[in-house]
Image (cartoon, rainbow, N blue to C red):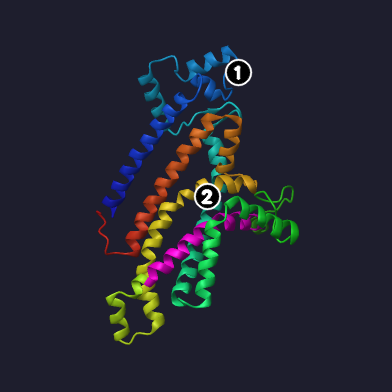
Amino acid sequence: MLRFVAMRLGKGVIVLFAIAVLNFFLVRAAPGDPAQVMAGEAGAGDEVFLEQLRQQFGLDRPLYEQLWTYLSNYATLDLGFSYRQQQPVLDLILDRLPATLLLTGAAFFISLALGVVLGALAARRVGKWSDSAITTLALVFYATPLFWIALMSQIVFSLKLGWLPNVGFETIGAGYTGFERALDIGRHLVMPALTLGLFFTAIYARMMRASMLEVAGADFVKTAYAKGLSPSVITRRHIARNAILPVVTLAGLQAGQLVGGAILTETVFAWPGIGRLMFEALAQRDYSVLLGVFFVSSAMVVVFNLVTDIIYRIVDPRIEASA
């Protein structure tokens, strides 16, 4: 297992290195002087200030020296400086990252749990009205745009019914502490997490249903029935345990996509995460922040994939750790 994790970490480092190099050339591929790009002024910056930027970042040096300096900074987690917000990029990201992890983590577990349960229920009742209802509902959520679900949930559950807060991370000025603050944040989290998770719930439900129906026809399941085991035991120990493996694989691959989906969700619900930070940086042409968020998001995807590989190994011990 240690060798397996070390190999995956090594591949992850190579991927992050390639992403850092890509970031370097993305800045230089943008129109105008890289100093103007980093300043976010699109050519309108003061020439003295731009010259200071060129000296500070070594832009007056040869390209290979600039690349080495850039990679050295990234290796020490120096992601640059935001001249729009007058803060280091890493500080900005770390300040917003907990909110994004809370949102994406809640959406991930909600979508995976609901998807597995609904898919298993549909497979057990295949051909009945409940199967048709779950399949149709999954198709609707899969085809419905994320922003429309977000806006409709705000209108229905916040403006019309008044059950949940409309936007934000917590109630401003309430002064809640301890359990009351956690409960307040939880109430603000419900709509964004459900909105972000419904799309993936539909995918997992359909895959779980199809996987369980496929496994149900396997020879070892027929043998279990022949031994006289109860249907509930066969479903739980033999069918569901094997059918969930493709769902776990897909969930791990799509865990990183939650960060991309969080950009729209955080913007609609005014959730103070890195997705909203990326949107604000794009509107302000703050390229240093954009590239920093891109790098951190990529690192999160690498970590998610590593965790998925480990979980997959635990769920199915037949898989060799060196694979």
Q: Position of residue 64 (x, y in %)?
A: 35, 20
For this orientation, the residue located farthest to the top is 48
Residue at horizontal 45 percent and vertical 29 percent from the top: 26
| Callout 1–callout 2 Cβ contact below 8 Å | no
Distance Cα–Cα, label 1 vs label 2: 36 Å
Q: Position of residue 37 (x, y in %)?
A: 53, 24
Residue underneath mark 2: 101
Residue 238 colored magenta?
Answer: no
Residue at horizontal 39 percent and vertical 46 percent from the top: 302
Q: Is residue 22 visible?
A: yes
Q: Earlier in the sequence, mark 1 or mark 2?
A: 1
- Tell me the quarter of the image containing the C terminus: bottom left
- Magenta-tinted stretch: 184-213
> Given the image, on which type of amino acid does mark 1 rest?
Ala
- Tell me the quarter of the image containing the N terminus: bottom left
Q: Position of residue 125 (x, y in %)?
A: 47, 77
Q: Position of residue 43 (x, y in %)?
A: 57, 18
